[in-house]
Amino acid sequence: MENVDPDHGTADGEPYFVVLVDDKLLERTKLVLEQDDGEYNITVRGGGLTTFGPGTLEVTVLLMDEDTERDDVFGRWTGEVEYNPD
């Protein structure tokens, strides 16, 4: 993520992920090490899920770039998962 936003932030990308469940913020990761392509494991604190009951939840994961003025969204994935807290 080099030279991604010199107009309103730093020139180098500072990527991190945000996890939303039913449009509620569940997790924000620390900055992640950059790699061309790949998979990342995002640890979600279990206590955050206690506000949700069983059923279908909409999960959105955003790939963000941290900046001084505003953070940018560089990628988005949304899907549904079946959740059973038992």
Image: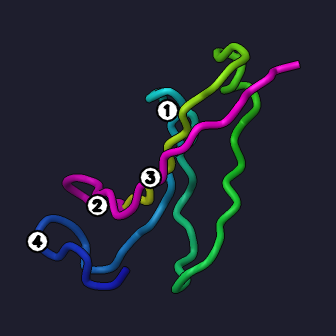
Disc 3 marks which amino acid?
Leu
Magenta-span inclusion, residue 8: no
Separation (CA) of disc 3 from disc 2: 15 Å
Q: Earlier in the sequence, mark 3 or mark 4?
A: 4
Compared across the picture, whether 75 is left or right of 42 comes to: left
User: Which residue shows up at 57% across the image and 75% down it?
Assistant: 33
Per the image, the residue denoted by label 3 is: 62
- The image quadrant that residue 30 belongs to is bottom right
Q: Earlier in the sequence, mark 1 or mark 3?
A: 1
Figure check: 45 above or below 78: above
Mark 3: give few (<14), some (14-19) or many (20+) Cα within 10 Å. some
Figure check: 5 above or below 23: below
- The disc at residue 25 is 1
Per the image, the residue denoted by label 4 is: 7
Contact, mark 3 vs mark 2 (Cβ under 8 Å): no
Per the image, the residue denoted by label 2 is: 67
- The image quadrant that residue 39 belongs to is bottom right
